[in-house]
Amino acid sequence: MKFLQVTNLTKRYGNLTALSDVSFSIRDGEVLGLIGPNGSGKTTLFECLGGVLPADGGVLLGGDRPLTPAERIATIFYLPDAITPWPTQTVTWALDFAIGFFGGRAAIRDDVVLRLGLGPLLDSTIATLSKGQRKRALLAIGLLMPQPVLMADEPFEGLDLRQTREVAQALRAFADAGRTLVLSIHQIGDAARVCDRFVLLSGGRTCGEGTRDELAALAAARGARSSDLEDIFLALT
């Protein structure tokens, strides 16, 4: 079942078209992976959907009608990459502020802290965290926000292999409990580990959408002989 539908989203910077008629669906309770190399338009797409940038064309539908700005804010929480909010505050303060100020999900706070391994970091200020630690703290904030859709840009950036697997398992668990996650990922192996479906983005255009098996069938029709996600991406882009 479709939850949201992105239709013909376009973004231009002068003569440069960063996104061209991008269309795909977001289904309730899934982990959707937006896959593409650096420069493919992933962050621009997220910023348009998250309301940070105005789009030059296209629409975000909820059901059969466009979402109003207020409905978009109530539906999607966009978590950018490489930000350091409230640098002088502790992780505990940031989590509790997200819950209290934004009406976040207090009931899952302890579970989020446990699954993301934040216990030893709760009394640390955000500015003192390493890149990987800060990424986990920000993901925790995103998971505690009240919006049904969490849109996270590069959620595994800065994490080592073990941390990536642990965070992927945590995100998978919250999706299985009903949270809808849209993840921008440039490492295809990371995407294969956690996502239910994929949107392939290259040069600002969608080149495919579907499950791994659905995309493999499309790639096979173009002569690809492997079901490896990297090979599928190369065949379709």
Image (tube, rainbow, N blue to C red):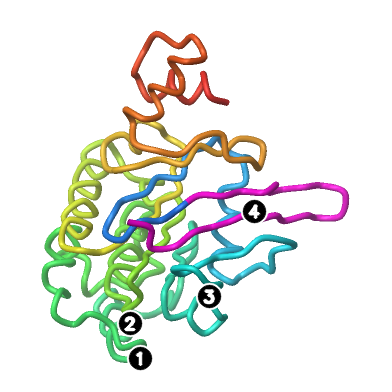
- Where residue 59 appears, x then y in whole percent? 61, 64
Assess disc 1: are there few (<14), some (14-19) or many (≥20) residues with their C-alpha within 10 Å of its C-alpha: few
Q: Quadrant of residue 117?
A: bottom left
Q: Where are the magenta residues, as a range?
A: 1-24
Real-space Cα separation, disc 4 to disc 2, in angstroms: 33 Å
**Element on which disc 1 rests:** helix
Given contact means CB atoms under 8 Å apart, are the residues at marks 4 and 2 in contact? no
Q: Residue at 72% x, 61% y: name it.
A: 57
Which residue is label 4 attached to?
A: 8
Which residue is the extreme one toward the bottom?
101
Q: Nearer the viewer, residue 213 or 155?
A: 213
Residue 67: which numbered mark, if any?
Answer: 3
Say if 90 sits above or below 6 in the image.
Answer: below
Marks 4 and 2, the one that precedes in the sequence: 4
Real-space Cα separation, disc 2 to disc 3, in angstroms: 24 Å
Given contact means CB atoms under 8 Å apart, are the residues at marks 1 and 2 in contact? yes
